[in-house]
Amino acid sequence: MSEHNYQLLEVAGGVPVKMWTKGVPVETEARQQLANAARLPIVFKHIAAMPDVHLGIGATIGSVIPTVKAIIPAAVGVDIGCGMMAAKTTLRAEDLPDSLATLRSAIEKAVPHGSAPKSRGRDPGAWENPPDLVDQKWATLVDEFDALCELHPRLEKTNNRKHLGTLGSGNHFVEVCLDELGFVWFMLHSGSRGVGNAIGNHFIELAKKDAELHQRNLPDQDLAYLEEGARYFGDYVRAVSWAQKFAMSNREVMMANLIATVRQVITKPFESHVEAVNCHHNYVQKEHHFGEDVFVTRKGAVSAKRGEMGIIPGSMGARSYIVRGLGNPESFESCSHGAGRVMSRTKAKKLYSVADQIKATEGVECRKDEGVIDEIPMAYKDIDAVMAAQKDLVEVVHTLKQVICVKG
């Protein structure tokens, strides 16, 4: 056997954890979380930890958890279907306007983003009057959503249609990037927004009640799971699959809106969607691995089947990568979903200043104020080390460097 690229974490009373973390820091708490998940009786074969692995709620972000006839809602998380979309264009660096600030401002006006406490009135991250494109897309989702609301009425009073085609906040972003040959790419990162959050939280609560009912001895309450045959299992599978469709549609609407906006600023005609990629990195689906049909939950991980295209973004001051999967069976054909945080948002705000943010994002047209210090590049792992640790999972097809970044 050739030497494996992963490190093995043996877990007493559980399955092993295979960690693609050579040369990358991993917190002790993240290791503990991985071990907790590995002790669940429903986990199949082993857990795969990606190089961007870090502490999450219940399950670590950057982990791939295969389960038999059961799903852990908190491992899927509340930003169900969160992921990336990228589209290459025929534009080149020299076609971009001299003032990138004008283009950034146009994008910020065209794509609702950010969030505000309910007490402040209107949600800046929602449409006041959704455009036609949103309504056309919503028409393909609404029947299934109404059926879910009949079963779970609390999902009705959520931001759903008005969040379709919007960015959100935190680490969600829209970027204009240049590849190694000087071609312009558009890239964005978002998920299922308010409605996905409501679905996630609702079923996490139901899974916890189910665990109490069956007196399951869980290493962490957030690892409560729903088994096939359980009262809400079928509903959760339906709801999660719908939220994943919503997330995919959300990115498609945003990308169409983004391209239309750029066409208004850059008058030179261009083609887009050349080599477009749209992939989830927080989701669950049924797959076949090691001779068995299992549910694979990728919490901060991307599917990397042989030949499959994916996106691994760096921080707002680093490079991002368009990759092709190598179909490594040991990682359940997965790779990392980004660089991964090395510190909490609170710690980043304490440690760094606006001056640090300005220096770290030099050459990028983006916000450089107190509100985005938690997204400073230094709060993330080194993307080059992350890529080196997973060289047996993916190969790099394009290297992108952002020139404009709009943060939620």
Image (cartoon, rainbow, N blue to C red):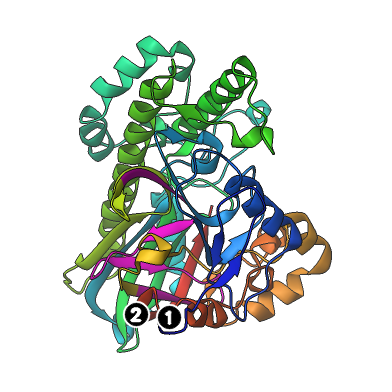
Q: Nearer the viewer, residue 394 or 99?
A: 394
Residue drawn at the location 41% of the way across and 39% of the way down? 68
Q: Nearer the viewer, residue 280 or 216?
A: 216
Kindly indicate whether the residue at mark 1 contacts the one at mark 2 (C-beta within 8 angstroms): yes
Q: Is residue 107 above or below residue 194?
A: below
Secondary structure found at label 2: strand
Give the total number of marks visible in the rendering: 2
Residue 331 position, x and y percent, is 42, 64
Q: Which residue is mark 1?
A: 391
Label 2: how many residues lie within 10 Å, few (<14), some (14-19) or many (20+)? some
Label 1: how many residues lie within 10 Å, few (<14), some (14-19) or many (20+)? some
Q: Nearer the viewer, residue 392 or 273?
A: 392
Q: Nearer the viewer, residue 344 or 262?
A: 344
Amino acid marked by disc 2: Glu
Q: Is residue 154 visible?
A: yes
Is residue 268 found inside the magenta-colored segment of the image? no
Residue 257 position, x and y percent, is 30, 52
For the record, the magenta segment spans 293-322
Q: Is residue 242 left or right of residue 273?
A: right
Residue 135 position, x and y percent, is 25, 32
Q: Which mark is residue 395?
A: 2
Residue drawn at the location 74% of the way across and 76% of the way down? 356
Label 2 – label 1 distance at C-alpha: 7 Å
